[in-house]
């Protein structure tokens, strides 16, 4: 180290000037250069010791990145329900059951995951960049088909990136399966990985579409769950939201979808921002209806805390005609404080009538034997 230069950095001089009541005079300090060099060495040694001490502290007590809990995450969530941003466990459901008409019953497929929230509780947007971790929970209930895989499409304002994530499964669900869960009365399988958000041409709110795909017969997928979960991407690109209002601002939109061969999409969704906690009366905008190329929807259902796998339909808050768009009012004072779930479902019968003809199955027999339904489950916290 050049201690001469260091001495000038810290303002030392051979000649020190002191004020005097009579006059200012220069005083030559004996052996001043040696004194300055010695002082500089002491400063450097002290700085080195301080640096070593800080390093030891950091090694012993590393700074932890902020983590946030995922609201509603199952106990066996692979990441322990903790992520670098606030998340919420959303779930899509596909049903092929005679809820409105028919006799054929292929049960349910559920696809759920901890997804980044759209906003912090303060109202600030939650932003995601680079590779986003995801763990998809697929539940198969009373479904005789082959669960082929879980997957994610990243659908943006510019393109649909179909290969964003895929977890191959290739399993049937039976009570003797190692994935059988008594608690869910079905098979539970997790698929983990990451989604490269940089493939999107645009930043802003884009859509995660998670699904579980089942084949019952033939070579095609017969049934899958899907959805539309909004995530704000921030990779230094122009902002253009996938679902935007006329003024370009982002819409509040969360959707679950059920797809069956011949029936296509049946959807149920929320058009309000999902709150961190609710009290009093919670008013939430919903839509229940047919999706892309879907047969006509005829019935909608909304309830709090159902458990259909064990015959519990929950507390109904809407049970009527579809398509339906409107506001549901939930009196949370009638609920206990803590975690609850809002369930939405839309039913579209395949009965062969105009607007509800679902054509033939792969073996040539009629597909007008049941009802296609799409569902969405959203957790919420009551705090009265």
Image: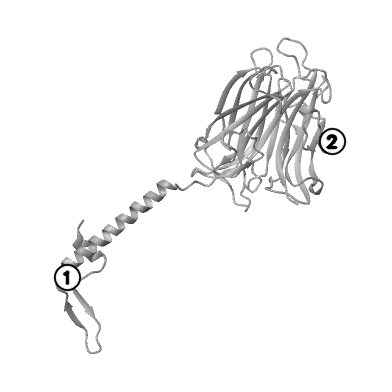
- Identify whether 277 is placed above or below 320: below
User: Residue 182, percent across and down?
Assistant: 71, 25
- Compute the Cα span from label 1 to label 2: 93 Å
- In the rendered image, which quarter is residue 142 located in? top right
Find disc 1 in the rendering and name its residue.
Answer: 32
Residue located at (50% from left, 42% from top): 235
- Identify whether 192 is placed above or below 251: above
Specify how the rendered protein is coloured: one colour
User: Residue 292, percent across and down?
Assistant: 70, 29
Q: Secondary structure at mark 2?
A: strand
Residue located at (61% from left, 25% from top): 150
The 10 Å Cα crowd at callout 2, few under 14, some 14 to 19, many 20 or more, is: few
Looking at the image, residue 255 sits to the left or right of residue 68; the answer is right
Quick check: can you spot residue 296? Answer: no
- In the image, 233 versus 138, the foreground residue is 138
- Identify whether 121 is placed above or below 205: below
Residue most toward the left?
Answer: 31
Residue most toward the bottom?
Answer: 22
Find disc 2 in the rendering and name its residue.
Answer: 319
Residue located at (60% from left, 44% from top): 86
- In the image, 42 versus 235, the foreground residue is 42
User: Residue 168, percent across and down?
Assistant: 57, 22
């Amino acid at each position: 180290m050049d201690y001469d230069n260091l001495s000038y950095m810290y303002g030392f001089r051979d000649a020190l000037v002191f004020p005097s009541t009579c006059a200012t005079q220069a005083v030559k300090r004996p052996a001043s250069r040696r004194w300055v060099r010695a002082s500089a060495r002491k400063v450097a040694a002290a700085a080195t010791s301080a640096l070593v001490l800080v390093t030891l502290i950091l090694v012993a007590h590393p700074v932890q990145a902020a983590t946030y809990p995922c609201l509603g995450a199952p106990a066996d969530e692979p990441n322990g329900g903790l992520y670098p941003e606030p998340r919420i466990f959303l779930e899509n459901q596909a049903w092929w059951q005679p809820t409105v008409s028919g006799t054929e019953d292929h049960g349910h497929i559920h696809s759920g995951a901890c997804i980044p929230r759209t906003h912090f509780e303060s109202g600030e947007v939650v932003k995601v960049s680079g590779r986003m971790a995801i763990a998809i929970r697929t539940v198969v209930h009373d479904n005789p088909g082959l669960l082929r895989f879980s997957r994610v499409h990243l659908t943006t304002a510019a393109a649909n990136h179909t290969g964003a994530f895929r977890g191959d499964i290739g399993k049937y669900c039976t009570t003797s399966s190692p994935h059988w869960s008594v608690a869910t009365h079905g098979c539970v399988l997790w698929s983990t990985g990451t989604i490269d958000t940089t493939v999107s041409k645009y930043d802003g709110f884009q859509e995660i579409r998670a699904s579980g795909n089942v084949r019952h017969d033939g070579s095609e997928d017969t049934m899958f769950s899907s959805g539309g979960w909004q995530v704000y991407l921030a990779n230094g690109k122009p902002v253009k939201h996938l679902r935007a209002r006329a003024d370009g601002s982002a819409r509040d939109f969360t959707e679950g979808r059920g797809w069956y061969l011949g029936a296509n999409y049946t959807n149920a969704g929320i058009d309000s921002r999902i709150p961190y906690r609710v009290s009093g009366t919670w008013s939430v905008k919903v839509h229940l209806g047919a999706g892309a190329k879907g047969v006509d929807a005829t019935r909608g259902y909304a309830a709090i805390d159902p458990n259909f796998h064990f015959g519990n339909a929950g507390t109904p808050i809407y049970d009527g005609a579809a398509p339906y768009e409107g506001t549901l009012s939930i009196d949370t004072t009638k609920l206990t404080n803590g975690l609850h779930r809002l369930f939405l479902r839309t039913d579209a019968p395949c009965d062969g009538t105009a607007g509800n003809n679902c054509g033939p199955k792969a073996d040539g027999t009629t597909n007008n034997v049941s009802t296609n339904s799409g569902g969405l489950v959203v957790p919420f916290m009551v705090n009265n």
